[in-house]
Image (tube, coloured by chain):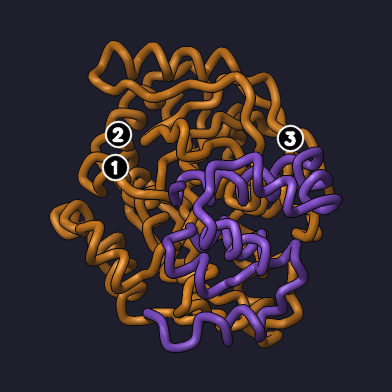
Chain colours: A purple, B orange
Amino acid sequence: MSLYQVQKLIYHVNRDPERRERYRQDANAFVRTYDLSEPEGAAILNVDVRALYTMGVHSLLLRPFTLLNKVSNEDYAQALKGLV
Amino acid sequence: MPIVFACAASHAPGMTAWTEAAPKEQAENFLGSYRKLGDRLAASKPEAIVALTVEHWANFFLNSMPAFCIGRADHYDGPVEEWLRIPKGRVPGDAKLSAQLIDACLDGGFDPLFSDELLFDHATFLPLHFLNPNMSVPVVPVIINALTPPLPTPKRCFAFGEFLGQVLNRSEKRIAMIATGGLSHWPGEAQHGKINIPFDKNFLDNLIARDYTQLTAYTHEEINVEAGSGGHEIRTWIALAGAVQSWKAELIAYEPVVPWATGCGLVEFNP
């Protein structure tokens, strides 16, 4: 249950092809292998850009992760609208 | 031989990945100047390039994040990014020079991490693509944490660069030094796309004026607010300024390229 675990999951999906494949095959099962709170797990599963950003996921982890999940530049910017 | 060449350059991935998104004149001016810097690097006949660089989660994660890391490999593969439109390749290293640098650091009051295996992401591979296009000159990467706080202070980066410069000036090899990163940019942040031209110009003025008091006085908060999370990469430029303090810095190009979401700078240093 920590930002560290959320970022670790994202780092693994971004950088490790084997883990990325497991995430793609069964995201629910993959997320359960990390020590995440229910909201953290939901934010990952929903690719909730705004929730992940506001919980403090590093932007250079988040943007590649959202690109893997086919979030366009426009949708990404829209999700962060109004934040500083 | 002493240091024979030095330059600092931005490395926005859009320079290669979406070159044509930029206004044609801006792209041609900037990338043309980048290639000419590469010609001058080659003309200086360096036997090794010491690259003051950064990385973006290519090698390190929060379980182990060095302030400074010196690569000690025989070669480095990259680029990590499939979409960079730079062919994958292998860059030769100079493990002997790396080992000499690491020993000198430990003897001289600096304790960097060392690594015998590093991947290059766009931070290192993109500048080398322009400055060392055939990847013929071996590279020693010196990675500075500009990615995730806490970061080494600009003052400490300047001192580290100053020390590396002293060591390299005693090397038996001809050394080119490059610094890569910056200037202002907010990659993946809510302000993505913003460029702070006044900050960039002021930073470049300080560099050219050799105002080391100003260059070492930047605070983390000031850079974070004024130049974005990507702006922290100016630490590599500050370290290079420390390495070649007696050299004159010349602005080769500055282009605030909106589609590349980065204030893009090129500076050459000459004795």
Q: Chain of mark 3?
A: B
Q: Residue at x 58, y 51 (%)?
A: B123
- Which tag, 3 or 1, sits closer to the chain's start? 3
Q: Is residue A51 left or right of residue B105?
A: right
- Residue B228 location in percent, x, y? 39, 69
State left or right for residue A58 relative to residue B107. right
Q: Report helix, strand or loop for mark 3.
A: strand
Crowd band around label 2 with a 10 angstrom C-alpha radius: few (<14), some (14–19), many (20+): many
Q: Residues within 10 Å of mark 1 (few under 14, many from 20)?
A: some
In the depicted structure, whether residue B145 falls above or below residue B180: above
Element type at mark 1: loop
Identify the residue position indicated by label 3 in the image: B77
Give me the residue at 48% from left, 16% from top.
B172
Residue situated in front as seen by the camera: B172 or A36:
A36
Tags 3 and 1 both on a single chain: yes
Please name the residue that numbered disc 1 is placed on. Answer: B152
Q: Nearer the viewer, residue B1 or B264?
A: B264
Up/down of A6 relative to A66, above or below:
above
Q: CA distance from mark 2 to mark 3?
A: 26 Å
Count of numbered labels shown in the rendering? 3
| Image x and y of residue B21, in percent | 72, 82
Q: Chain of mark 1?
A: B
Q: Residue at x 38, y 19 (%)?
A: B170
Q: Earlier in the sequence, mark 2 or mark 3?
A: 3
